[in-house]
Image (cartoon, coloured by chain):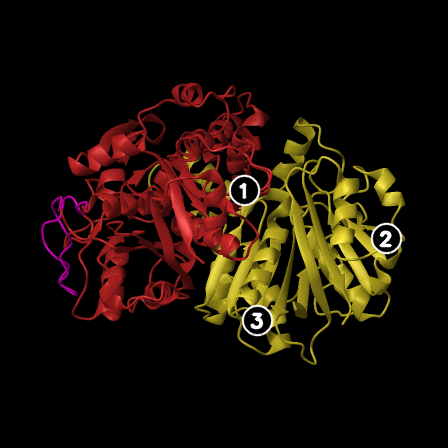
Chain colours: A red, B yellow
Amino acid sequence: MKIYITGTGIVSGIGNSINETYNALLTEKTGLTQKEYPNLNRSFYTASVSLSNSQLAKSCNCKNEKISRSSLLGLKAAIECWGENQIHPNIKTGIISGTSVGGMDRSEIFYRSHLANEPANFNDLMFHDSGSVIEKVADHLNITDYINTISTACSSSSNAIMHGARLIKAGKLDRVLVGGVDALSEFTISGFKSLMIYNDELITPFDKDRNGLNLGEGAGFLLLESEASIAKTGNKILAEVSGYHNSSDAHHQTATSPTAIGATLALNGAIKNANLKIEDIDYINSHGTGTGNNDLTESVAYTNVFKENIPPFSSTKAYTGHTLAASGAIEAIFCILSLNNNVIFPNLNHKNSIPETNLTPVTTVTKDVNLTHILTNALGFGGNCTALIISKVK
Amino acid sequence: MYYINAISSISHQPTFNNDGFSKHIEPLGENSEIIKPIYKEYINPKVLRRMGNLIRMSVASSSECITKVDADVDAIIVGTGLGCLTDTVKFLTNFIQIEGLIPPTSFIQSTHNTIAGQISLNFKNNGYNTTYTQNTLSFELAIEDAMMCLDEGMDNVLVGGADEFIPFLDEFKKQLDFNNLKLTSAVTFLVLSKHKTTQTIAKISDCQMIFNANDKTDDFGSFLLKNNLEIDEIDTVNYSTPILNRKLNQSFKKGVDISSLAGVYPTNSAFGLHLAVDEIQTGKSKKIIIYNNLSQSKLGLTLIENI
């Protein structure tokens, strides 16, 4: 059974729509800027969405701008993705989102006041529950058949795409909005800082001198449909989810294994699931966070799987920053843009290859490439490794 | 078929490594505490020292399951409503109050999937690994996925529900006028298997979720119909709270209030499932429905039967 993608919606540091995003990718415009974080007494390179909470609420026709920023970002992307679609009594419709910190932006506001013994609004904590983020979006779009939130750290939305595809194959749903959201939060910035992997400079994925990650925020959603659903909706097919696999690295809570056990299993599993051969993969959109550990593990995994014939690959994190749980969906959308425009978006800021594996990513916008199958992978805390294959539909 | 080949809980009741516990349990008293096992019998002491409370409970409980079935599992699936709250609040407090370097441990352990991740580490399991967090339906979503994994060809899946209480929740409850129930922590893990073995205790026949449960009586009726059952064929209904639908609750042959026995936490239907399995194991019941009405607008229905 084929799982078609018939809608996409995105918001990130490089744009507030699919069109803005595509233009930024083509013109190598990064969303990362140095921004002051007064509460943390310093500046950080982050990629924040240009719209404020009230602008987001207004553009989404959402009456309550006091909901978490994650919900507002999710709404923005989900509305673009959903487009003119309607709820239909004979089309079972669900929504699955990935998030790592949910409404932490509101919890932080509460805790700052609470810890300072100032009056704090307990209603701010109503958004702490990660599941509430997507419930606001489901409410807005009247989606009631299935609502789920996946929280597997940085691979969350890749797993949301995989789970949506499986639910359609199992006949439980006919179409499903799948994606992920994470707003920037002082919690996550401080967290990666405490792990000593927050880069003080712009990130340089897959570079010999890479020195950690920069965070970004955003949301990405894809509409997955069965053939039967498309027969009713008449939606245009953009691409298909042709393969997926999730594996556990079982090596360390935060670090990836030097032999890339989990990542290799995920890549091989997705290729097998899609009934493809390794030589069918035309390009890889990498996780490539820019940390010493992640990028090395990923390039070891590519070597394990593809041996001498590693397809062109690039990490687009230097555009968007690491959008955590949203990154898998955002990058899956980049894959669709690549497929339908025959273009590979570059790995910005790259100078020298990682000596251990000597792999060089694509560093310039490369047009007129024939792309049929793109692999994209995500590696998260807890050893969570997920790979997806997005394919052109002829 | 979806066979339950092992189940384990750490809760306020003597559930851990104690088949037949359902024969003599009573509603929670005011000062009731969680009955914890000796963790170092299940977890390497070096690793144990750094583990948060919810992770300890989850790793120990899943260990008991895996030991019982004596087989590798193909997947680890966890449902949690609020995740690792202790570590989340600890890190929130630390970064707000401490200037300069802060220890990363509580940040690392704040992630919801630390539970499933630590279980995979404990068993060196490279299989499918995922975590669902949809407040009161998190456990049912995990069960549904476990059933799908077996349909897709897996043999054994470890699936669980885990949630953690922090004292701050009581303050939160007061401020927002939540009803006066005991909030607490607990975990339940089970091995769901495609194969009936000598270990098999019961089976899951159906698990359904309704996300806009406007008429729970109607939803319950449809669930019975779908499974070709009459209400009197159901020996017991384990429900999360008797408050929301008193009228419906009166139609049950026997109703058991999960929250009065296990306390309130988003995944307490998992305790309800363990209780059902234990009652079936001791021969007291043949068919039990777990009726998760902890949230006003949602409903989880799980049918457990003897084999």
Q: Is residue B16 above or below residue A122?
A: below
Name the amino acid, label 1. Thr
Co-location on one chain, circles 1 and 3: no
Q: For the magenta stretch, what is the residue range?
A: A344-367
Task: Return the chain for callout 1.
Answer: A
Q: Is residue B153 above or below residue B304?
A: below
Query: Element under label 3?
Result: strand
Name the amino acid, label 2. Ile
Q: Quadrant of the N terminus of chain B?
A: bottom right
Q: Is residue A83 above or below residue A358?
A: above
Judged by depth in the image, the label closer to the viewer, 1 or 2, is 1
Name the amino acid, label 3. Asn
Based on the picture, tell me whether residue A259 belongs to the magenta stretch.
Answer: no
Q: In screen coordinates, is A257 left or right of B293? A: left
Q: Tell me the crowding category of disc 1: few under 14, some 14 to 19, or many 20 or more residues within 10 angstroms, Cα based.
A: many
Q: Residue at x 36, y 63 (%)?
A: A274
Task: Return the chain for callout 3.
Answer: B
Image location of residue A107, percent across then percent down: 50, 32
Image location of residue A296, percent across then percent down: 23, 60
Query: Element under label 1?
Result: strand
Q: Residue at x 61, y 37 (%)?
A: B168
Residue A13 shows in the view: no
Residue position marked by numbered label 2 in the rendering: B231
Residue position marked by numbered label 1 in the rendering: A93
Residue A205 shows in the view: yes
Q: CA distance from mark 2 to mark 3?
A: 32 Å
Residue position marked by numbered label 3 in the rendering: B156
Task: Return the chain for callout 2.
Answer: B
Q: Nearer the viewer, residue B141 or A280?
A: A280
Q: In screen coordinates, is A41 left or right of A117? A: left
